[in-house]
Amino acid sequence: MVNTCKLLSAEQQAELRNRAKTELERLEAVYTDEQTRERINRFKDKFGICEIVYKVILEDYQFNRTDQHFETFLIDMRNVPYALNYAGYDFDKSLLTHLFGAERKVGSRTVKTLRDSLTHSVNQKAINELVSRETELHGYMDQFLTKIREVDAAS
């Protein structure tokens, strides 16, 4: 693979380094606020649990369909209801869409897309959305995890 990237001038390099430094300072300021950091981490950790639990089911579902083991698993709403139904769950599709869907519009992002935003850009709009919708978003994750727990308890 040949690197075909054009070289930057010394001034362009300095400008790029300054932009990176500014972003670092912005992120450090966000994460200095302990309440914001805790809120983001609690949200991301809970979604991580939902995602890992779902991927246990997805792995079996995909193997059953293809006779192949995959290294990575993509959460795609075209498969989520089918994989969960395959495992014997009867989740409401609306809940699954709020949890794993792809809506990216600020103010109505899914849990997954807001988590992605808080992981990859941590902008103020994402933080504000988490603050304003925190109870709702955690509610979707709690419903999912409760149903997973209840099925196990009934066995």
Image (tube, helix red, strand yellow):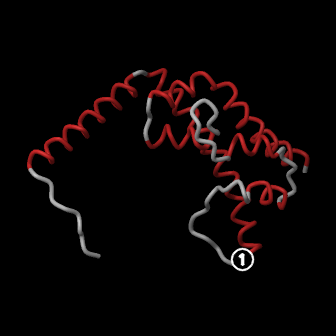
Relative to the observer, which residue lies in front, 18 or 58? 18
x, y (%) of residue 94?
A: 79, 42
Please give the name of the residue rendered at 13% of the width and 43% of the height, measured from the top-left corner.
Answer: 14
In the picture shown, does residue 22 fall above or below 8? above
Please give the name of the residue rendered at 73% of the width and 44% of the height, measured from the top-left corner.
Answer: 97
x, y (%) of residue 80?
A: 74, 55
Q: Farthest right residue?
A: 154
Question: On the rendered structure, is 118 left or right of 30?
Answer: right
**Residue 110 found in image quarter:** top right
Q: Amino acid at mark 1?
A: Thr
Judged from the image, the secondary structure of the residue bearing numbered disc 1 is: helix
x, y (%) of residue 114?
A: 57, 38
Relative to the observer, which residue lies in front, 106 or 62? 106
x, y (%) of residue 36?
A: 48, 24
**Residue 66 found in image quarter:** bottom right
The residue labelled by disc 1 is 66
